[in-house]
Image (spheres, grey):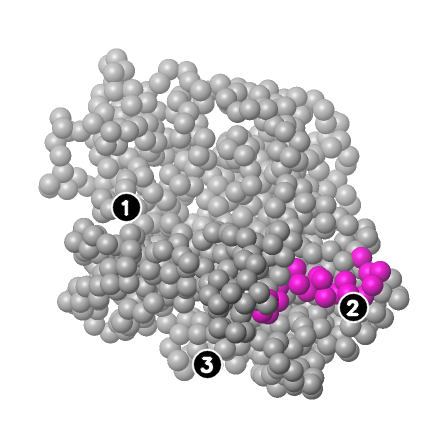
Amino acid sequence: MADATLTGEATALQRVRVAVDAPQHSGLTGPLDYLGPQDLAPGTIVKVGLGRRESIGIVWDAAAVDEDALAESELRPIGQALESLPPLSDRWRRLLEFAAGYYQRSVGELAVSVLPPQLRDLDAKQLHGRLKKLDKAEARAAQALPSRSVDPGVAPPATASSAEDDALAMPDPPLDDGEAAATASGEAELDATLPLSPPPLTAQQQTALDAVRALYAVDPPPPALLWGLTGSGKTEIYLRAAEDALLRGQQVLVLVPEINLTPQLEARFAARFSGHSIVSLHSRLTPAQRLRHWLSAHLGRAQLVLGTRLALFASMPRLGLIVVDEEHDPSYKQQDGARYSARDLAVYRAHLERIPVLLGSATPSLESWQHALSGRYRRIDLTERIGGGALPRVRLFDMNRLERKKGVTTALSMPLLEAMRQRLARGEQSMVFLNRRGYAPVLHCDQCNWKSDCPHCSAHQVFHKEDRTLRCHHCGVAQRVPRACPSCGNPDIAPLGRGTERLEEQLAAALPGARIARIDADTTKLKGSLEAQLTAVHDGEVDVLVGTQMVAKGHDFRRITLVAAVNPDGALFSSDFRAPERLFSLLMQAGGRAGRDAAQAGRSEMWIQTWYPEHALYQSLQKHDYQAFASSQLAERQSAGLPPFAHLALVRAEGRTVEAAREFLVAAQEAAQQLPLSLGLLIYPPVPMSMARVADVERFQMLIEAGNRAQLQRFLRDWLPDLHGLKKRHKGLVRWAVDIDPLVI
C-alpha cells in the first residue's frame, strides 16, 4: 500500500494537529501542528519528526489556530501515515483527551504510551506485511475449527501458537520453551471442543443477572457495583453478561488487577467461549504478542479482551460491556508516568460508549461504596455462597495470652498449630498468610545495635536465607551476609522478625511430614513456576500453603479449610488513612479462600493472630460485616474531610539532596499561594515521603486538598506551568510529578 506523504501528487496540504510524546520538561501538553494531506482522518497513526528523531503520532481533531501559531510554511511535514490501519475512533480519542487532562499529562504522552511498543518501530510497508500474516494465521485457525455458527462480520478466532507469533514477528528470535508457555497464557488456547454448558443459576444470581440486563434500558446505563461475597458466583454473572454482549455482536473488555493472580478467570472465559476469539493484554506478553493482540482488538476481530490496567485503553470498535473484577484493588492505579486509575477511567469510558460497566468486589472501595449509597452507582448484591456454603468462622487469637519473652514472640501459636494438625489428619489444606517475603526483614547485632540498613535507601536490607544474601526490596542492591557485625565484630548477628521464608521453615519444623509450599515473588521468578505451584495446590499435592498477598485473592482453592493471618497488626497504625481499608479487604479476600467447597464450608475457619482483638476492624471482620466497617470508615473520613468527601492531589519531588527536593516544593507552594484559584484549597507544607530515600534519591511530597474537584483541576492547570519553570531553576532536582487521587500518602 502506498504511503501518505507530503510529496503525494495533487494532494492539497493543510495544518494537521498530531499528538506526539513530547518530553515532559518541554511543558507541551497538547497536540503539535504539522503539515499533512487534507484527507488525513483524525485518529490516523502517522510518523513525524520530533526534534532530531522520528516519532509516532496520532492525528488529532482540528481546533482553532492560536494567534501565535507558526505559519503553515514553517511547519514540518508529516512523514507517512499507517493507512493499513483504520483510524482510532472518536470515542477513543475523547477517552485519552479526558484522561490526559484529568491526570495532568500530555495527551501525546498518554496516547503513544498505550499503543503497542512494536507499532512505533514499523513503517507502513512493514505494518501491511504484519497484517497479511495475521490474516493468514486467522484463516488457518478457522480451518482447524469444526463448523459452527459465527456472527457475521466477526473474524474467526486465532489460536495461540508460537509458530504464528513467529511468523507475525519476523525480526524476533524464535520462542524458547519458556516463551512458548507465556504465549499459551497470553492468548487463550482454543481447541476444537464445544463451549462448556453454563451451570444453573441460583435464584439470587438470576436476580443479579436480570438487574445487569436491565441496565441496557437506561441511556446511558449507570455504572453497576456487583457486591458479592467471596464464592458467591460473581464470575458467572460476568460470563452471562459477556455472553449477552457477544450474541449482540459486541466486544467485551474484562479487567483484572493482576493477570497472573487470576488464572481461573482466564481459564473460565476460554472454556466458556471456546470458538470465540479471546486475547489478553498485559505486561508479560512479548512485544510481538502484544502487537498481535492489540491489532485483533482494534480490527474488531477479538471478541473478548482480558487484561490488566493497560487493556483499558485497547481500541475496540464494537465495545458493548466493560467488567472490572476486584474493583477495589490498588493495582488498578498506575504508580509512575501518567498515574491514572483504570477503574475510574473504565467508568468514564462506559459513559462515552453508552454501555454498562460492571464493578465487582466482595469489599468495594469506599469511593465506589459511597457512590452506590448516593445512587450514582446501581448496587447489585450477592449475599449467599454457591451451594449454600457458610463463610469461614473467624477466630481472633489474642497474642497477649502468650508468655512474654525477650525478642519477637513466635509467629505460630500452639492453638493454631493444633488446628492445622487437625486439617492434616483429615486430608484438608491450610493456608498461612504473611505479607512479607524473605527470611527476616533485618539482621541485628544485640551488642552495638547495628542493623542491616540499605546504604542507598531509608530501609533495611532483607535477609534471604536460601542464598545467604541481604537484599533491598526498593533499589535492588544485594550483598552477601557478613560473617560478623561490620560495626563491632560480634559474630552473633541474628535475624529479627520474620518473612515467608522463615515461616515456611518454622512450619516444616512444627509439622513434620507435611507437604509445605511457598508462593511469593521469590519462588515465582521463573516462567511457569506460579502456574506449576498453583496446579500442585489444586491437585492436593500441598498440605500447607505459605504466601504473601499473591495467594490471598483470585484463586478458587477447593480443599482449603483453614486460613491464618499471623501478623496483620502493622496496618492498624499506619499514617496512611487508607491502610485500614486495604487491610480489611486483604483479610476478607484471604479468608474467602477457605470453605469454597460447600461440603467443607461448615468447618472452615480463619485465624487471625493479633495483639488487638478488640479493634473495631477485627470485630467487623469476625462478623463478615463489610457494611458496618464501611459505615464506620466513611463517618471517620467525612469528619476528617478525606476522600470520598474531599479531593486530593499530591506533588512529589525527587532530588540529589534533601534541600533540592524540599526547596523545589517550598517554591512551588509559594507560587501556588499567589494564584486566585488557591483560595479555599488546603496546601500542606512539604514533608519527606514515608520512604524518604530510594537509590540515593531524596523524596519529598506536598498534599493539596479541595472540597470541589473542578476547582482543583482548574488550579492545577494554572499552576503546572509554574512548576515547569521552577524545574529549570532548581538544578539539583531529579524529577517531579503530580498524582491525582493518590492511593498512597
The reply to whether the magenta stretch includes residue 356 is no
Which numbered disc covers residue 611?
A: none
Displayed quadrant of residue 688: bottom left
The mark that comes first in sequence, 3 or 1, is: 1
Residue at 65% x, 50% y is: 523
Displayed quadrant of residue 649: bottom left
Q: Which residue is mark 1?
A: 24
Residue 469 drawn at (x, y percent): 57, 54
Instruction: Say which amino acid is labelled 2.
Output: Ala
How far apart marks 3 and 2 lie (CA) works out to 42 Å
How far apart marks 2 and 1 lie (CA) works out to 56 Å
> Farthest residue toward the top?
9
Mark 2, secondary structure of its residue? helix
Mark 1, secondary structure of its residue? helix
Instruction: Say which amino acid is labelled 3.
Output: Glu
**How many residues crowd around disc 3 within 10 Å: few (fewer than 14), some, or many (20 or more)?**
few
The magenta segment:
494-515
For the N terminus, the image quarter is top left
Q: Relative to 64, is 370 on the left or the right?
A: right
- Labels in figure, total: 3
Mark 2, mark 1: which one is toward the viewer?
A: 2
Mark 3, secondary structure of its residue? helix
Q: Which residue is mark 2?
A: 510
Residue 185 drawn at (x, y percent): 64, 39
How far apart marks 3 and 1 lie (CA) works out to 38 Å
Instruction: Say which amino acid is labelled 1.
Output: Gln
